[in-house]
Image (spheres, rainbow, N blue to C red):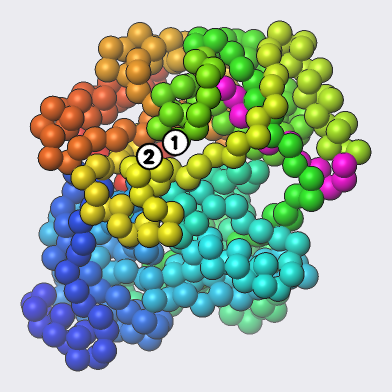
Amino acid sequence: MSQTDLLDRLTNMGITVRRSTASTVVGGLPPDWVVEPASLAQLTETLHGLHDSEVPWRVDALGRNWGYDDSRVRTPGVVVRLARLDRMELDLELGLATVQPGVTFAQLNAALRDAGARFHLPAPGSGPHTSVLGNALDRGLLSGLGERERHCRDFLVMERDGSLTRLGWTGAEDERVRRALPYPPGPHRQGSLFQAAGYGPVVVELTHVLPVAPEHALRLAVLTGPELTGELVHCWRELLDAELVTSSILAPQARRQARGAVTTHDGLVLDLLVTAGSAPLLRAKAAEVQRLAREYRQRLAFNASAHADDLRILGGAAERPEAVAELGEGLEWHTVALPFAPSAVTAFAQAVRADAVLADAPWTVRPLDARALVWLFPFVYRKDDPTGLDLLHRRVAAVDRIRDGFRLPAYRSGGVRGRR
């Protein structure tokens, strides 16, 4: 079956077939078509047809996730968009949300508020209108949760040939037990579903563990000079080991300015969020944070501002994320994973600072836990500016060169568009 015959067949079945919109990244190719099934039955027919026709294809959730990379493919082919699969089911007793790819953070949190639930799921940097499922499969990092892979369970998966399976389960189990358990019994292949960039099996539903919304919170900041020191790294690790902070992120002035934060401090800032279930416990945790900061000779300040989402980097509106791809600016993200060891972190920081094309580039450092962290470089460029595109490629090459020199891996794949 040719691609034309396949698309005619899908259209006759009532499945939406349309051209792609623009993208914020310069790599990859726009797809020939975007196909949007509205049900699992339509998705099954779509995958059966694609499998029989041998047309190359990948899936995305909403087309607005990591780097806002909507509808890019490695080779000419089709994107199957799952935005219309948007069923959601809440278990407020166990604190679980079962979602399809079309459910956004905004929709989930609105449903939780309407239900008077004590749970919430904070939105990622890509904004509240990102897919909960899509962001999780990209190993999204969320405030207080870290990497989200360990908070996902009970995967309903459609294989590339259109067959449907409840990964690791027989189908005869009690539904609530299945959703409550972190893994199915015995060996399982859940990890193979993450960072497949839409080219692996299609996750059409998963259950996400919901954190309890904190009743009391306090934002603090460690203010340091421009150099990342071993003392700061030691202090940071102690805060995480003692579970004193719910979330933390380190950023230079260039990164804070890119996100719209106004500050007179020109050094590094380690933003800390301290949460607790009671006011006395919050005060006790804050006092311990202050004690550790003094012990490691760090300057602690009150920080009342929360992080803006990364749409602000491009001047996009949080309520219209789809418009970002139409802007004149593009956004790429590149990452490096590091052990949370002072010597390793400070050496990498010195290499970045010493590189001519990276010295003034924005970045952030986020911990996965007290053992590992991720250094993230968001690069903004003008799509129609050859000089800016050349700088983008030189910055990507510099990140690759330094990362390879330290024998460190890239942490994420979705939306990353380097030359490698």
Check residue 259 in the rendering and tell me which mark sits there, or answer none: 1
Check residue 410 in the rendering and tell me which mark sits there, or answer none: none
The reply to whether residue 133 is in sight is no
- Judged from the image, the secondary structure of the residue bearing numbered disc 1 is loop
Quarter the C terminus occupies? top left
Work out how far the residue at label 1 is from the one at label 2, CA to CA, in angstroms. Answer: 5 Å
The answer to which of 153 and 239 lies nearer the viewer is: 239
- When asked about the image quadrant of residue 353, the answer is top left
Is residue 411 inside the magenta stretch?
Answer: no
Which residue does the image show at 75% across and 42% down from the upper left?
Answer: 217
Check residue 313 in the rendering and tell me which mark sits there, or answer none: 2
- When asked about the image quadrant of residue 259, the answer is top left
Where in the figure is residue 183, as x and y percent of width and height?
63, 60
Q: Which residues are magenta?
A: 269-279
- In the image, taking residue 174 as reference, residue 141 lies left or right, namely left
Kind of residue indicated by mark 2: Ile
Which residue does the image show at 36% across and 82% down from the upper left?
Answer: 38
- Judged from the image, the secondary structure of the residue bearing numbered disc 2 is helix
Which residue does the image show at 83% across and 31% down from the upper left?
Answer: 285
Number of other residues with Cα within 10 Å of mark 1, as a class: few under 14, some 14 to 19, many 20 or more: some
- When asked about the image quadrant of residue 34, the answer is bottom left
Where in the figure is residue 371, as x and y percent of width and height?
62, 28
Q: Are marks 1 and 2 in contact (CB under 8 Å)?
A: yes
Chain-order first, disc 1 or disc 2: 1
